[in-house]
Image (cartoon, rainbow, N blue to C red):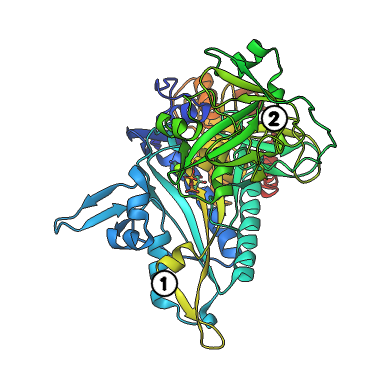
Amino acid sequence: MRYSEMFLPTGREVPSDAELISHQLMIRAGLMRKLTSGVYSYLPLGYRVIRKFEQIVREEMNRAGAQEIFLPMVQPAELWQESGRWVRYGKELLRFRDRHDRECCLGPTHEEVITDLVRNEIKTYRQLPRNLYQIQTKFRDEIRPRFGVMRCREFGMKDAYSFDTDEAGAEVSYRKMFEAYQRIFTRCGLNFRPVEADSGSIGGRYSHEFMVMANSGEDAICHCSACNYAANLEKAEIARPAESETAGTTLDVEEVNTPGVRTIEEVCSFLQVAPDAVVKTLIFSVDDTPVAVLIRGDQEVNEIKVKNFLGCDSLELADDAMIRKVTGSPLGFAGAVGIQARVIADYSLLGMSDCVMGANREDYHLRHVKPGRDFPIADYADLRIIRESDPCPRCGGEVRFARGIEVGHVFKLGTKYSKAMKAVFLDQSGKEKIMVMGCYGIGIGRTVAATIEQNYDADGIVWPLPLAPYAVIITPVNVNEKMLADAAAELYHILTEKGVEVILDDRDERAGVKFKDADLIGIPYRVTVGPKRLAGGKMEIKTRRSGEVAILPVSEVTPFLIARIREGL
Ligand code: ATP
Ligand code: MG
């Protein structure tokens, strides 16, 4: 393409809401423009990158045996009512009525639609397994759209859905998608990690998120420094510590007056004890029933773990009334001794034998409390937030924290939707069975933005070749010099002919301006056609990423570029 004809508005200006470098560069390099909050238009250069990524996704999905379909974006409320999500999904689901007053929504995801399609068409085990995918626009009315297309409201997603006859089959489908995702993100040249993720309390289900490592990422990841264990911070497990033989305190429980002392810090400074000698008692309202969660004073409760452990629908900190009811005292003095609630304890309580805790009496705490002796604990479980340097649950090595951008998600759904929506089939013996499902998403725009987060420098974007909108830009330093313009145009024709994606910067601009634009839009190879070199029959090839410069005879330029591009460099 000739630059002079391109719709490619580059610039220095950055919108005030663009915090992330990828957002800034996507605007500056003319990849996209904002229409309204969380809604973006892709311009030609940006759309080429999107198409490149989609093509990689498509090839790998097809290779993994998935088949491409295209589902509607407008979806009837009835399907969502069947699955139960019409009510549960919340405000991210954009609902509206059509002219006949029928309730509809814009698809934020397509489990309902695909399950409906499959239940109508697939009747026997002979038609299973199937994996169907689409690359399509989703709408989620995100509460706080931000970071450009990283978290927007209208965005492209590849979503795939697998249907199997049983768990074992579903596991195979899941593995195939997991491997396809690894190939996809590897082909894009990304530094990424699959991490174990929380998948709610649907027992036995699990999921992995594919994270592109970036300090700007919204997600916290915990990974082992010794093995390849990695998990979303919320999910990261903590193994039950070996119980040490501690005789414990022989002193009797003692009530001490602690006027106005409520927080762990206040307790520690008032009683001159360390936080790890204090037990924190949190009262939760669990499906409207009180549950006391005990944890060592220097640790924090992970509510997701509590929720999963209890298998409840709702979990929130108890209000004053509930606290008073179960402890007989106001907030800040709760303890396990004599409490009127089920008590569960984090593993951090194991080995605590002489502790301080609330006395269930205003302005009082207890000391010399011995769990087991002074109060019973119904269950010990992993209920806390992991911390850096905690032992890895797999190998015992130390865990480290990092940040990432979730670009993909593979999820075992089990029979959640197929059961609710009656997606059944007849097995070999003619018995009706429920299909076992999986779902697999990749954010298209988010992956492109994440790619920029990992590939930029002070001058602009540095595209990995597989996603670059063009592989080569030819820059004659002065288009008014016929010799330069002709040589550049000739190279442009040869490369185009060979199928290389190339821009000819034929603008009547200063060389410096052209170089800046070429760097900003991140084209992997720039061929400079200048008077001195051309007089000697040569051209200069600069590699965007390394800055390496090769000066080659004109006849060698094309083979050099083609060889590099073929190698995917
Ligand atoms: P998040 O936790 O970031 O909101 P999610 O769990 O809601 O993500 P999924 O429902 O698993 O995401 O969607 C699949 C993929 O779609 C995600 O991995 C992500 O790449 C992409 N995605 C989700 N929400 C957005 C959004 N608001 N803007 C851009 N991409 C998104
Ligand atoms: Mg979300």
From the top left corner, tell me how far across and down residue 233 is, in percent.
Answer: 62, 37
Q: Is residue 190 visible?
A: no
Q: Residues within 10 Å of mark 2 (few under 14, many from 20)?
A: few
Q: Which residue is mark 1?
A: 422
Three-letter code, disc 2: Ser
**Rendering coords of residue 451 (x, y %):** 57, 38
Mark number displayed over residue 248? none
Residue 27 in sight here: yes
User: Which image quarter holds the C terminus?
Assistant: top right
* Foreground pick, 349 / 210: 349
Mark 2 lies on residue: 546
Quarter of the image holding residue 236?
A: top right
Percent position of residue 267, x then y:
62, 16
The answer to whether residue 347 is above or below residue 77 is above
Mark 1 or mark 2: name the one nearer the start of the chain: 1
Q: Is residue 489 left or right of residue 98?
A: right
Left or right, residue 466 beside residue 284: right
| Residue at point 63%, 62% (across, down) | 176
Q: Which one is nearer the viewer's eye here, 317 or 72?
A: 317
The residue sitting at 81% across, 44% down in the picture is 395
